[in-house]
Amino acid sequence: MMDEKKLRKILSDLPLGDIRYYSQTGSTNDMALAWATEGAPDFSLIVADEQTSGRGRSERIWLTPAGSALAFSVILHPTQVERDHMPLLSGLGALALTQVLKDHGLSAQIKWPNDVLIMGRKTAGILVEVVWMGNQVESAILGIGVNVLPVSVPLDSDVLFPATSIHSEGSKVDRLEFLHDLLAKLLVLRPKIGEKGFIQDWEEALAYKSETVHVWTEPSPEQSSESFTGIVRGLESDGALRLETSGGIRTIKFGELHLRPVK
Ligand code: BTN
């Protein structure tokens, strides 16, 4: 269980919007999407101790057993600069995570666009969802799930990519302290969106740099599936992945896609 009083106290030094805590909910992203349309202030936070229908990208299930993980969503009312750089919001979450993990003694990498790996295993995932008002982004929901204790780690047989947790990798962080540090880092990095240094830091944290990966997209009504194999060379200023393929440099735009190392 998460102690709500302690949660509010530990976060009280941060300039957050409002906070809503649930000992159990379906998905914090769903709660955030609903709250965003009801006028939640910028940087409002929804935290759940347990999620019963947590969601990942590509409609995958994201498990959050009670007492073992961090599952939260931040509601952002994007500035104009952020609206111009929406794909970077996933990078914001991933970069904040790698930096805070480093502060807690763990080296982490970003499996582009937004999975966070420790020792090659996934320890956190990010799901950004957007509320539109006409053709303008009204709010963005930054949903973050972090495996903190080993019980939050799904079995290899249940996931497409092997997972781990912060405690399994040797850092016995306190969940609430980690949440505090992560939110503080998000607040520091958010104004850097659109700056060159933001992309450079994201690029520096990339997994599989100079290694060969396979990237494929999900088919959509507008576009059939695409597949590329190439060497990871870095990021473009819009957060697109730069791959060196046999046909030359390709840039892969952020979207519903998958990336795997080629052994
Ligand atoms: C992924 O790896 O595909 C993204 C996982 C995102 C999980 C988080 S947990 C908090 C928030 N609420 C959800 O339902 N999903 C995100």
Image (spheres, helix red, strand yellow):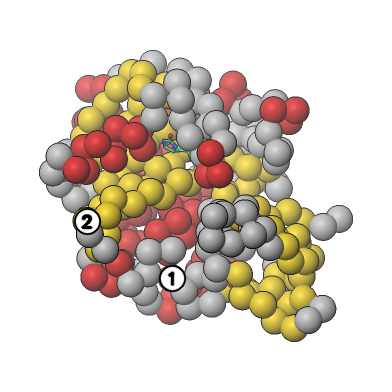
* Residue 46 x %, y %: 29, 34
Name the residue that disc number 2 marks.
Answer: 133
Is residue 219 visible in this depiction of the protein?
yes
How many labels, in total?
2
Inspect the image, locate mark 1, and give the three-letter code of the amino acid beneath it.
Phe
Image quarter of residue 149: top right
How packed mark 1 is, by other alpha carbons closer than 10 Å (few <14, some 14-19, many 20 or more), is: many
At 57% from the left and 73% from the top, the residue drawn is: 235
Q: Nearer the viewer, mark 1 or mark 2?
A: 2
Q: Are marks 1 and 2 in contact (CB under 8 Å)?
A: no
Camera-side residue of 130 and 48: 130
Name the residue beneath numbered marker 1. Answer: 198
As shown in the figure, which amino acid type bears the numbered disc 2? Met
Q: Quadrant location of residue 23?
A: top left
Outermost residue toward the right? Answer: 263
- Residue 135 picture location, percent across and down: 26, 63
Q: Is residue 17 above or below residue 255?
A: above
Residue 130 placed where, x, y %?
Answer: 34, 52
From the image, which quarter does the C terminus lie in?
A: bottom right
Left or right, 153 with reference to 209: left
Mark closest to the chain's N terminus, 1 or 2: 2
Q: Give the structural element (helix, strand or loop) at label 2.
A: strand
